[in-house]
Amino acid sequence: MQELEQFRQEARDWLEENCPASMRTPMPEDEVVWGGRNATFKNPDSRLWLERMAAKGWTCPEWPSEYGGGGLSREQALVLAEEMQRINARPPLVSFGISMLGPVLLEFATHEQKLQHIPPIVRGEIRWCQGYSEPGAGSDLAGLGMKAIREGDQYRVNGSKIWTSYADKADWIFCLVRTDTEVPKHNGISFLLIDMADEGVTTRPIDLISGASVFCETFFDDVLVPVDNLVGNLNEGWTIAKRLLQHERTMISGFGLSSGRSNRGGLSSNLAQTAKQYRGDEEQLSDASLRDRIAQFDIDAQAFALTSQRSREEAKVSEGPNATSSMLKNYGCELNKRRYELLLEAVGSQALGWESPEGGDFNQDELDLTRQWLRSKGNSIEGGTYEIQLNVIAKRVLGLPDMTGMLAKKS
C-alpha cells in the first residue's frame, strides 16, 4: 500500500508538471487526437501531451514496457486514471489500435509482430481501422467472402468491406479474410493485417443521415500482403475475431458513460444543466415529468458506470473481456440513445436546426446536437447488432440452448 501511495504522488507530480493547461479543459470534437501518419493537431499542446504521455508509455499504461507500454500494474493504472481525472486531463490519444487491435496482438501475435506494430500504436504513429463486415454478409460475420489466396510468401487479397469506420483516414486495417472455402465457414477464416497504402486498396465514404462520413466502403483488388502479416494460425482467425469483438463491444459500451462524466463541451455533457438552460428555470426544472426522467437517467447512468468499472476490474484479473461485454454494449448503447432523446426534448425546437448562417437562429452546439442524435441511432448496429448481442447473452451468459442449431438439425 505504501508503494502504491508513493506511485500516486509520483504520478501526481509528473502530471502537474507535464500536462499543459489547455489539456485540462473540455475537449472539442475537432481536437480529439487519433494519431497516424498524417495526424494533424489543431491545438499544439495536443501533440506535446501525446509525446509526453507516449514517452512514459502511459497512452497504454498496462501494456508491457518491452513493447513501449507503461508496464504498470492494474492497481497503478487505476491510480493513474484517478489522478488524470482529478485534473480533468484529456485522453492523449483515441485509437482503435489501443481499444481493439493491441490487446489481441498481445494475446495472439508473435514477438516479432508485437515489436513491429505495438510501439507505433502506443506512440500514435499508426492509425488503424477494422475490416469485418461485408456487403453480402449482413450480421452473419462468419459468412464473409473476401479471399486471401497464398502465392509464395504473399497473399493475394480480393473483396470488399463495408462500415469500415474512418478507413479513409487510416494507415492500416485489420481484416478477416477467407483462406479456405472447403471447410465450415467459421473454420476457414484468417486474421490479416494490411497496409492501406498498398496498391489495390481504395476507400469510399458512406454519407450518413447526420451528414457525416464516419463509415466507408473499402475495396481490395489484387492486393499483395506478406504472409508475415497473418496473425495467429491459418484458418483460426475466428477465435481472434471473437476476442477482438469483446474488446470492441466494451469500448462501444462506453458511449453510455459519457453522460455526466464527459470532459467534452457541448449540450450533451450535462442533461440537467441543458434542460434548465432551455426551460428558463435556473432553480428547478419546471417540467416535473422531464425532471423525473432526467433524474432516473442519471441514476441509471451512475449504476452503469459502476457496473462497467467492476467488469473492467474483473476482466483484468481473469482472461480478459468475455461475453458480458455484450450485455454492457447493449445497455450502454441504449443509454446513450436515451440520453439524446431526453436532450432533444429539453432543447425543443432549437434542436431542429440543420444549417444556420452567421447570426441565425441556431448556435453551433444546437446544430451539433441534431447530428449527434441522428448518429446515436447507429449505436445499436455497430459492433454487432442488438439482436446479435442478445444471442450471445443467451448462449454465453445464460447458458440457454442454441435453438437455431437445434432447429437446423430437425429440418
Image (cartoon, rainbow, N blue to C red):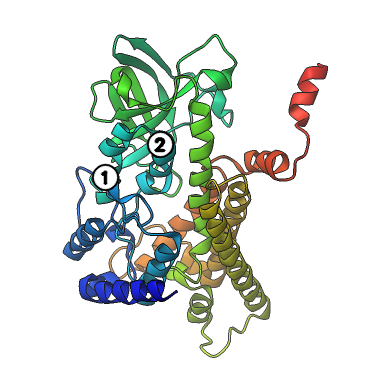
For the N terminus, the image quarter is bottom left
For the C terminus, the image quarter is top right
Question: Which of the labelled discs sits on residue 398, or is there none?
Answer: none
| Residue 231 is at least partly visible in this image | yes
**Residue shown at 49%/13% (left/top)?**
180
**N-terminal-most mark, 2 or 1:** 1
Residue 80: x and y in percent read: 37, 67
Q: Secondary structure at mark 2?
A: strand
Q: Is residue 31 left or right of residue 371?
A: left
Name the one closer to the observer, 14 or 402.
14
Instruction: Say above or below: 341 vs 384.
Output: below
Give the amino acid type for the residue marked by disc 2 in the picture. Gln
Camera-side mark, 2 or 1: 1
Query: Residue lying farthest bottom?
Result: 283
Q: Secondary structure at mark 1?
A: helix
Q: Quote the CA–CA distance across marks 2 and 1.
A: 19 Å
Tell me the crowding category of disc 1: few under 14, some 14 to 19, or many 20 or more residues within 10 angstroms, Cα based. many
Residue under label 2, please give it: 130
Tell me the crowding category of disc 2: few under 14, some 14 to 19, or many 20 or more residues within 10 angstroms, Cα based. many
Residue under label 1, please give it: 119
